[in-house]
Every structure is written in structure tokens, then in C-alpha cells.
Image (spheres, rainbow, N blue to C red):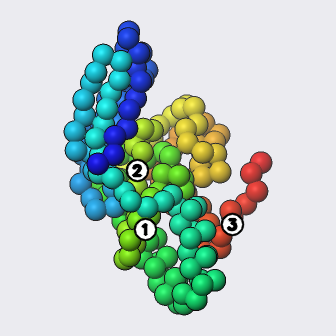
Amino acid sequence: MAIKRTHIGHFGSTAARASAFSEIEVLSYMDHPNVVKLVAAYQCPTDIHMVMSKVDGYHLIKYLVVVEKEEASGRSHAEIEEEKMSLLHQLVDAVAHVHSRGVVYRDLKPANVMVSSAKPRKLTLIDFGRATHLDRADRLERQAPLGTSLFQAPEVENRAAYGQQSDMWAVGVVVYLFVSGRMPFDHS
């Protein structure tokens, strides 16, 4: 198990408390092998603790470094490509599950994608702290940008109306990074 602690202070910061409870609620809707599983949640006087399934592995960027070393040590390129395609399929499947539950993730980036160290490697989407309920046809408007700007859709960056489709922009950026080893464009 892994425990995520959110400090709310003695007086229970309204924003921190609301954010933690929102993440607990969103995770309670998730039931997918490639999405972190919420096991339990506990509130103490100054903290909220979320007990989740633990992923033994590394973030996506670290995985790319590890797999590059494996290839230099003799692992076949074809085997690595097959593994990468499997992981990308798992990512798309996880995001589709999140969307099917009426949720927009809003923070897809390499730090929130874990890859198991054991083979066959498994991908797990973690950290639902910025996720919120939003059906496929609905839009959020005039929201401050959340997440990491290198992975945000243009409509999010411009504070225009956006929906679940903005997560797919981030999926595209991750796919490009995963396949090429670099970002698709320079940050401006």
C-alpha cells in the first residue's frame, strides 16, 4: 500500500480539505487495472490520509531512461517497441475509463504515469488531485489552468471552454514523448 497525506491544518483549510475529499470521491468511482486503486481514506485532526495500491516502479521519464539502458545492454529494439506500444495502449485505456466515469483528469504528465519495474510492465495512472466530474459533452469555462503547461491543450492555456478532450491532447503529447524521446514543440 501507499499513503498520500494531505495536510489540512488544525483549523481544516477549506481548500485543502475540499481538494482531498474531491480526490477521494473521484477515485472511489475508478475500478480499472491501470488506475491507482483507493483502498481507504482517514481523517485525522490535521491531515487526510488516502491509502492506495502501491506501484513498484518508476515515473514515465525514469522508465524511458531505464529502457534506453536496457537497449544499450542488448535488449532487442523490437521487444522494447512492443513493450512501449503495450504501455501506450494501457494509458489510452486508463484515460478512456476515467472519461467513461464522467471525470476529466486535467493533469496528465509523465510524473503521474507510473510503470512497473517487473515484467511484463504495467502502466498505472496516479494522482487524481486535479481531476473533477465532467461528462463528455460538458465544458469547464474560465478556469485557471491546472496541470503542467507543456501537456495542456491550447484551450486550457487560453482559459477557454474545455472538456474531456483536453486530456486527449495530453495523451498525444505523452505518446510523442514516449515514441521520440523528446517533446513535440518548444514551450512558449
Q: Quadrant of residue 7?
A: top left
In the picture, the disc for residue 61 is none
SS type, badge 1: loop
Residue 155 lies in quadrant? top right
Residue 21 to residue 151: above or below:
above
Q: Earlier in the sequence, mark 1 or mark 3?
A: 1
- The amino acid type, in three-letter code, at marker 1 is Ser
Say what amino acid the circle numbered 2 marks: Ile
Location of mark 2 (residue): 126
Dot label at residue 117: 1
Residue at 58 percent of width and 61 percent of height: 61
**Residue 100 drawn at (x, y percent):** 30, 54
The span from disc 3 to disc 2 (Cα, nearest Å) is: 22 Å
Q: Which of pointers 2 and 1 indicates the residue nearer the eye?
A: 1
**Cα separation between marks 2 and 1:** 16 Å
Toward the top, the furthest residue is 11
Residue 32: image location, x then y, percent: 27, 59
Q: Earlier in the sequence, mark 3 or mark 2?
A: 2
Write down the residue under mark 3.
182
Residue 74 picture quarter:
bottom right
129 over 72 or under it: above or below: above
Query: Does the rendering let one see residue 133?
Result: no
Instruction: Determine the residue positioned at 28% across, 41% down.
Output: 51
The answer to whether residue 23 of the structure is visible from this angle is: yes
User: Is 64 or 171 nearer to us in this picture?
Assistant: 64
Amino acid type, callout 3: Arg
